[in-house]
Amino acid sequence: MNLVVLGATGSIGASTLDVAARHPERYRVFALSAHGSADQLARLCRRHRPRYAVLSSAAENAELRRAFSGIVAGNVKDQGVRLIEQHGPFELHGDPELLRPLDGLLEGFIRDRRMKIAGEYRPCYRLVA
């Protein structure tokens, strides 16, 4: 059975995810949502591997920027830049309906100067459907 857990970072969500983790043969976490706590939602995503995750609070933008900054060329360290030059950009695989808005969100952060990028923005990734 596929589960969609609204309020995944709250106490009821935590209890639901605990039951799902104890019975993986019966339950699959399909989607998670939270109003805040981007770090906690990210941990839950790593553990339960949902297809979708939604963070509804605009107040979490700073945490999202920190989470995404690792895949923006201006924030990649020298060794990463050399690897990208040698092997090409990182490939982000996933659902196009999720990846395209992510790409737009990153571009918006750059355009609005919410991420500190010196020079021209060049993604160090490419979207692969």
Image (cartoon, helix red, strand yellow):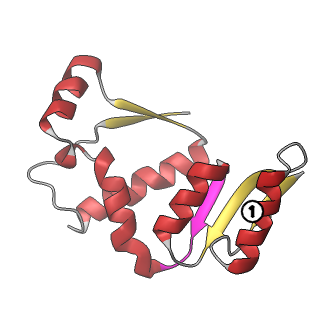
Q: Quadrant of the C terminus?
A: top right
Q: Residue 71 appears in which quarter of the rendering?
A: top left
Asked whether residue 55 is drawn in magenta, I would say yes
User: As shown in the figure, which amino acid type bears the numbered disc 1?
Assistant: Leu
* The one of 121 and 24 positioned closer to us in this rendering: 24
Above or below for 54 versus 94: below
Q: Mark 1 = which residue?
A: 17
Above or below for 108 versus 34: above
Q: Residue 19 appears in which quarter of the rendering?
A: bottom right
Magenta segment: 50-57
Q: Residue furthest left?
A: 119
The residue lying at 33 percent from left, 63 percent from top is 65
State the image coordinates of residue 101 (x, y, percent, origin top left).
49, 55
The residue lying at 46 percent from left, 66 percent from top is 39
Q: Residue furthest front?
A: 22
The residue lying at 12 percent from left, 35 percent from top is 78
Asked whether residue 105 is drawn in magenta, I would say no
State the image coordinates of residue 68 (x, y, percent, origin top left).
36, 55
Local packing at callout 1 (Cα closer than 10 Å; few below 14, some 14-19, many 20+) is: many
The residue lying at 14 percent from left, 48 percent from top is 120
